[in-house]
Amino acid sequence: MPEVVTLGEPLVQLNAVTTGPLRYVTYFERHVAGAEANVAVGAVRMGLTSGLISSVGNDEFGKLIIQSLRGEGVDVTQIKTDGAAPTGVYFVQRGYPRPGRSSVLYYRRGSAASRLGADDVRASYIKNAKWLHLTGITPALSDSCRSACERAFEIARKSGIKISFDTNIRPALWDSRDAKGVLLSMVSRADLLFTDPDDTRVLVGEGEPARAAKLLRERGPATVVIKLGREGAQAFTGKGAFKQKAYDVPVVDPIGAGDAFAAIFVCGTLKGWSTGKCLQAAVVAGALVITARGDEENIPSEPEIQEFLRDVKETE
Ligand code: KDG
């Protein structure tokens, strides 16, 4: 049974090869992505075992996702194939209208993964894990997906399995008022929380990291980690506050950085690393992911993180 278990929608990503508005893009590069699938791949890169609970369509993209995740070493036994709905897809538009930024266009409504439900979550799969990772994307997909998350939380809490939660609010998927209530209830059941100032403004009305983290820690999570993009990241624990600057790297496509960050932080925690070391390695992983198209390809292994640190400077 895998050490790190996650639940969510794997997607095929069609990433614009050239920057600019999508209507002028002729070539797209195909990748396998999806926040939770990315974390599962990251865990394997860090030398741990991982598995994804999900569903894909009985179509070429579904086959691609299973083949790719299996090839990466992720356990795919809990990914169902649903003959009645398609695999979700999204496009990435790069560098326009904000240079260095990307935007996402989803084609996932009614997808196979959006039909996941509580019955698809096997208690023994989570009970035998060391860690459960969930994100705020899955409960936004459908009521049944929200129930699947609730069940995963319940099993993990009852069995004493550590839980990390990445707020990942996607305004394209739901209204922020709906997101707030659902996600705050999930936040309160997490041990380790990943978030960013946009999300903390929605959740607790505060974008300043230390104040937001205080409000969030009061709700339950012992550790709150705030991702700050070009400003690096900060972690807040019972022992105090930790800061890590970003690294100076060329930005090709920032999508996926947060998942690499979460994967490496979770795995570092499982390996018994200090908060400072987890934070630094997680920022390195995020930095590497933004230098290439695709979410999973550039998630580093432990030796690759060390190699990066020997060579790359922090931002001024
Ligand atoms: O974090 C990267 C993800 O946003 C991307 O792979 C797509 O899972 C995705 C989502 O729902 O936005």
Image: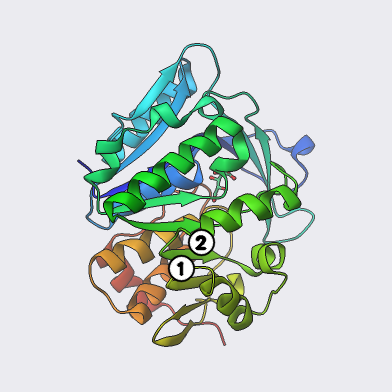
In percent of width and height, residue 51 lies at: 31, 40
At x 53%, y 12%, the residue is 84
Most foreground residue, 57 or 210: 210
Decide if residue 305 is in sight here: yes
- Looking at the picture, tell me which residue is in the foreground, 283 or 113: 113
The circle on residue 90 is none
Instruction: Name the disc covering residue 221, or none.
Output: 1
Residue that appears at 42% across and 65% down:
192
Tell me residue 115's x, y (percent).
Answer: 53, 25
**Left or right of 71 on screen, residue 86:** right
Residue 16 visible in the displayed image: no
User: In this picture, is 211 found above or below 53?
Assistant: below
The amino acid type found where label 1 is placed reads Pro
Mark 2 = which residue? 188
Count of numbered circles in the view: 2
- Compare marks 1 and 2 and give the one earlier in the sequence: 2
Residue that appears at 42% across and 48% down? 153
Q: Cα distance, mark 1 to mark 2?
A: 6 Å
Q: Residue at x 60, y 36 (%)?
A: 141
On the image, the x and y values in percent for residue 110 come to 62, 23
Q: Nearer the viewer, residue 218 or 85?
A: 218
Secondary structure at numbered mark 1: loop
Closest to the observer, 277 or 135: 135
In the image, residue 32 sits, relative to residue 19, either above or below, namely above
